[in-house]
Image (cartoon, rainbow, N blue to C red):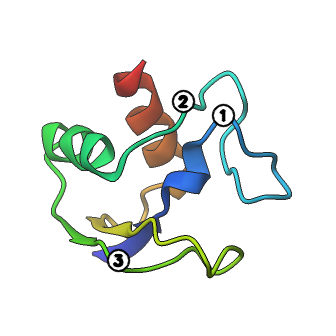
């Protein structure tokens, strides 16, 4: 098992790739909330923990939090993000 971090910015359709979005616009969701992301990860059956009082490194002034997810060693981080996005639309 390995861990991956999911910042809401990674799947936010309002963000550009340069601002930290990891998925394409077609998969991205508008203003994703940490709780909503956690709900989707839970439905996927993955172990996770939420860190609420953390700020995205590119925006240290904005406290948005992140989710730490345990995934299989051979799992694709991008695929996990896309699955989260699909279930949020």
**Mark 1 vs 2: CB contact within 8 A:** yes
Q: Tell me the tag on residue 2.
A: 3
Q: Is residue 56 above or below residue 21?
A: below
| Relative image position of residue 41 (x, y in whole percent) | 25, 46
All told, the count of numbered labels is 3
Image-based side of 6 in relation to 56, left or right: left
Q: Is residue 80 above or below residue 7?
A: above
Q: Judging from the image, what secondary structure is the residue with disc 3 in?
A: strand
| Relative image position of residue 68 (x, y in whole percent) | 32, 71
Q: Residue at x 32, y 45 (%)?
A: 37
Q: Earlier in the sequence, mark 1 or mark 3?
A: 3
Disc 2 target residue: 29
**Mark 1 vs 3: CB contact within 8 A:** no
Q: Tell me the tag on residue 13.
A: 1
Q: Residue at x 15, y 37 (%)?
A: 43
Q: Residue at x 37, y 26 (%)?
A: 88
* Quadrant position of the N terminus in the picture: bottom left
Q: CA distance from mark 1 to mark 2?
A: 5 Å
Q: Tell me the tag on residue 56.
A: none
């Amino acid at each position: 098992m390995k861990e991956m971090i999911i910042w809401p910015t990674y799947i936010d359709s309002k963000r550009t790739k340069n601002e930290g979005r990891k998925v394409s616009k077609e998969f991205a969701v508008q203003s994703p909330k940490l709780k909503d992301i956690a709900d989707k990860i839970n439905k996927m059956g993955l172990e996770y923990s939420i860190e609420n009082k953390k700020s995205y490194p590119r925006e240290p002034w904005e406290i948005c939090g992140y989710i730490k997810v345990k995934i299989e060693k051979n799992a694709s981080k991008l695929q996990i993000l896309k699955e989260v996005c699909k279930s949020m639309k």
